Image (cartoon, rainbow, N blue to C red):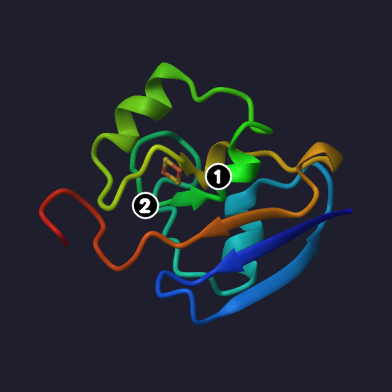
Amino acid sequence: MTRVRFISADGADIREVDAESGQRLLEVAQAEGQPLEGTCEGQMACSTCHVIVAAEDFGKLPPASDMEEDLLDLAANVTRYSRLACQIRLDEALDSLTVRMPGQSRNMLGR
Ligand code: FES
């Protein structure tokens, strides 16, 4: 089991959930009703699964691929701790992972 903490974009809502090791963060987030579209379902063709990882957890993640970095360039509200939730596979090393939703804007045009 891996515990994940989801924080809403405004910080007002914090939800913790236990996930199975091997699950992708995107599917856990969607099952919990978090506002991540994940339009391409992990096919690396959108950036609607963008999350902001807590600074203290960011180094626990394997580095983003070049393709993930390129897609993050298209996402709104990107920070240096941004990642794509479909590319994060949960395991014990990520226990207590905390991620924040980036907010309503979906792309550079603010849509
Ligand atoms: S769901 Fe499309 S890139 Fe993650």
The x, y position of residue 66, in whole percent, is 40, 17
19 in relation to 78, above or below: below
73 in relation to 85, above or below: above
Of 52 and 107, which appears nearest the observer? 52
Task: Name the kind of residue labelled 2 in the image.
Answer: Thr
The x, y position of residue 92, in whole percent, is 86, 41
Residue at the far bottom: name it.
12
| Separation of marks 1 and 2 at Cα, in angstroms | 21 Å
30 in relation to 54, above or below: below
- Quarter of the C terminus within the rendering: bottom left
Task: Name the kind of residue labelled 1 in the image.
Answer: Ala
Q: Residue at x 26, y 34 (%)?
A: 73
Residue 48 relative to residue 21: left or right: left
Q: Which mark is residue 48?
A: 2
Residue at the far left: name it.
109
Residue 15 relative to residue 11: left or right: right
The x, y position of residue 1, in whole percent, is 89, 53
Q: Residue at x 38, y 59 (%)?
A: 102
**Mark 1 lies on residue:** 55
